[in-house]
Image (spheres, grey):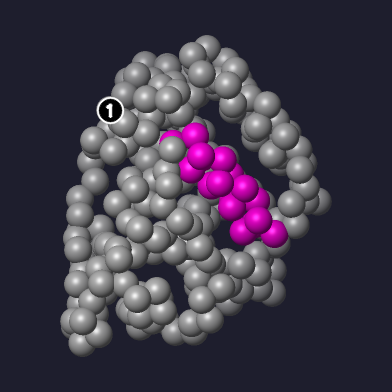
Amino acid sequence: MIVACHQPNFIPWPGFFYKALQADIFVLLDNVQFPISTSWVNRNRIKTAAGSLWLTVPVWRKGKTLQKIKDVEICNDLVWGRKHYLSILHAYSKAPYLEEHVDFFQAVFANRYRWLIDFNLRLLEYLKQQLRIKTEMILASHLGVEAKGTELLVQICQRLDATTYLCPSARRKYIDARKFQESRITVRYYNFTPPVYPQLWGSFIPNLSVIDLLLNCGSKSAEIINVA
């Protein structure tokens, strides 16, 4: 049993889904602290004629310094959903596969979600389906584990009877591999090279939201991610 963990990011980059493809169970870390500064949990980039553009979901932060991701509320006092939808529509008006997905994006950005986690999960559910990812995704908060750092990851693996924990090589220095060894769990490191694929608007920009790949490459997106 191979387990991987990741924060439930907003319209993530292709590497997020590559990681999911390599695992049997993909655990979304909704019970860890929401970053105090900028975070991929509520923002990501798309590509426009003027270069990359940040799409940021506004959230309530005042007085909530130590809030967990699952407790983050979207600031719906601001008019942001329609702006994001129109930004995607404008940026990808010439993309070959926009028509297949435009109705979903229009609907999801029109829905006034209260909780960021619910919004991100709806997006992840759709993207997972479009990328034909069969890996089960579950929330860490549903596992009843309370710890921090490596200990949290080990407890998640133990709860799921995992034999292997999947980890990007770039994160090697941030985990205590001895704790996995003590629990008889193998740590498998991997490398992911962002794929190069046909893009609109000039020179290729790597590490954008996966929707850039999906709208440009359609059903081929899953294959492109998996062979990267």
Name the residue: 59% across, 52% down. 121
Count of marks, rendered view: 1
Towards the viewer: 196 or 99 = 99
Is 116 one of the magenta-colored residues?
A: yes
Towards the viewer: 145 or 57 = 145
Q: Is residue 217 above or below residue 208?
A: above
Residue 209 lies in what quarter of the image?
top left
The percent position of residue 173, horizontal first and vertical second, equals: 21, 70
Q: Amino acid at mark 1?
A: Val
Magenta stretch: dominant secondary structure: helix
Classify residue 214 as left or right of residue 88: left
Q: Secondary structure at mark 1?
A: loop
Residue 61 lies in what quarter of the image?
bottom right
In the rendered image, which quarter contains the C terminus?
A: top left
Classify residue 185 as left or right of residue 88: left
Name the residue: 59% across, 18% down. 99
Q: Residues within 10 Å of mark 1 (few under 14, many from 20)?
A: some
Classify residue 103 as left or right of residue 125: right
Name the residue: 68% across, 26% down. 103
Towards the viewer: 2 or 111 = 2
Q: Which residues are magenta?
A: 115-131
The percent position of residue 193, horizontal first and vertical second, equals: 23, 41
Residue placed furthest toward the right: 77
**Which residue carries the number 1 mark?**
196
Question: Do we see residue 33 in this rendering?
Answer: no
Name the residue: 39% across, 46% down. 17
Towards the viewer: 184 or 187 = 184
Is 100 one of the magenta-colored residues?
A: no
